[in-house]
Amino acid sequence: MKTATVRDLRTKFPVLARWMDNGEPIEITRRGRVIARLTPAADEKAGKAEKPDMMKQLREIYGDYVMPEKEAKAILDYNKGKW
């Protein structure tokens, strides 16, 4: 584990950021005492859920249904001016 002072954190942050990018945790010290530990963030991809396929879900619900033009126009006309 690497060590840096509070002053290093303020003045040499790009160096410390590179250490963390390389997976290295850092202990932050003030007056010789450890006051904090910086650890690299977990891989974002590991925690992200897969986005649902909304078009697939809509096709499963409505199939090949296409709204008639007259009905679509009525909805659009109803909503005019309300946005």
Image: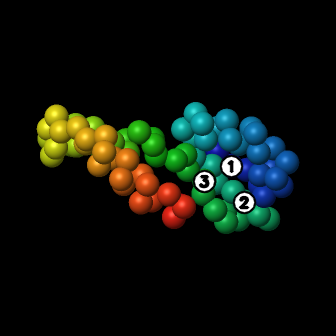
Give the amino acid at mark 3: Leu
- Compared to residue 69, the image places residue 28 above or below, namely below
Query: Residue drawn 76% across and 39% down?
Result: 14
Q: Residues within 10 Å of mark 2 (few under 14, many from 20)?
A: some
Contact between marks 2 and 3 (CB within 8 A): the answer is no
Which residue does the numbered mark 2 point to in the structure image? 29
Q: Earlier in the sequence, mark 1 or mark 3?
A: 1
| Residue 74 in view here | yes
Which residue does the numbered mark 1 point to in the structure image? 3
* Separation (CA) of disc 2 from disc 3: 11 Å
- Compared to residue 32, the image places residue 60 above or below, namely above
Query: Residue drawn 64% across and 38% down?
Result: 19
Which residue does the numbered mark 3 point to in the structure image? 38
Instruction: Name the side, left or right, on which 43 lies relative to 36.
Output: left
Secondary structure under the numbered disc 3 in the rendered image: strand
* Separation (CA) of disc 2 from disc 1: 7 Å
Give the amino acid at mark 2: Thr
Query: Residue drawn 55% across and 50% down?
Result: 39
Give the amino acid at mark 1: Thr
- Compared to residue 74, the image places residue 33 above or below, namely below
- In this view of the protein, which residue sits in the foreground, 11 or 63? 63
Secondary structure under the numbered disc 2 in the rendered image: strand
Instruction: Name the side, left or right, on which 6 lies relative to 39.
Output: right
